[in-house]
Amino acid sequence: MATRTASAFSSTTRPASISITANTQPAQAPASNASSSMSPELEQKLALLSSHRTVLGYLLVARGSHPSIIRHSGVVFEGEQGKRYAAVVAKIVESVQSGLDEVRRDDSVPASGDDSDEVKFLRIRTKRHELMISPDERYLLAVLHDPAAFS
């Protein structure tokens, strides 16, 4: 079982805490059976997240060599486009983590304890959308939102 705290939008645009707990094996979790293994609290929070007026959808992705969608909401994440988003989100997190590792190796300041740093949250804003990614050891939660909806 993995537990992760992810950020989501509250009505005031400040991040609210969501605890992700899934009792699935990431590589074996088909999207159709994922909801039966998730806690009721997670189900409720994901429903709340997807009902927010600015959220276009979310992806809960199992990490690994072939990222797979455990659960999604929103038309934008359906079918092949959803698979592409899942692969790209995984690549983004992997690339940022590699960059952090490289900077840390090149850093002249001595490490205090742990030599590694890990990505906790990414927020990518484009002209049209904002993609928020909360990585975990086994899962990635990606939320696509329309910041213009607040206007």
Image: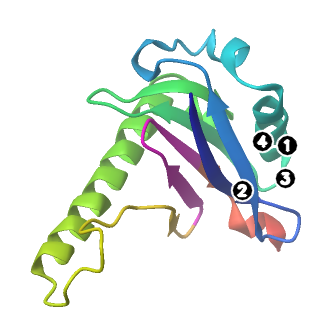
Count of marks overlaid on the render: 4
84 left or right of 132? Answer: left
In this view, the mark in front (4 or 3):
4
Which segment did they paint magenta?
A: 128-142
**Secondary structure state at the residue bearing disc 2:** strand
As measured in the structure, the alpha-carbon distance from the residue carrying label 1 to the one carrying label 3 is: 10 Å
In this view, the mark in front (1 or 4):
1
As measured in the structure, the alpha-carbon distance from the residue carrying label 4 to the one carrying label 3 is: 8 Å
Q: Which residue is under mark 3?
A: 53
User: Label 4 neighbourhood size at 10 Å, few (<14), some (14-19), many (20+)?
Assistant: many
Q: Is residue 101 above or below residue 142?
A: below
**Coloring applied to the structure:** rainbow
47 left or right of 38? Answer: right
User: Label 3 neighbourhood size at 10 Å, few (<14), some (14-19), many (20+)?
Assistant: few
Q: Which residue is under mark 4?
A: 50
Is-magenta flag for residue 135? yes
As measured in the structure, the alpha-carbon distance from the residue carrying label 2 to the one carrying label 4 is: 10 Å
Check contact, mark 2 vs mark 4: CB within 8 A: no
Quarter location, residue 109: bottom left
Which numbered disc, 2 or 4, marks the residue that appears first in the sequence? 2
Check contact, mark 1 vs mark 4: CB within 8 A: yes
The location of residue 99, given as percent across then percent down, is 22, 67
Residue at (52, 54) in percent of width and height? 133
As measured in the structure, the alpha-carbon distance from the residue carrying label 3 to the one carrying label 2 is: 12 Å
Which numbered disc, 1 or 3, marks the residue that appears first in the sequence? 1
Badge 4 amino acid? Ser
Q: Which residue is under mark 2?
A: 8
Q: Which residue is under mark 1?
A: 48
Check contact, mark 1 vs mark 2: CB within 8 A: yes
**Secondary structure state at the residue bearing disc 4:** helix
Which numbered disc, 3 or 2, marks the residue that appears first in the sequence? 2
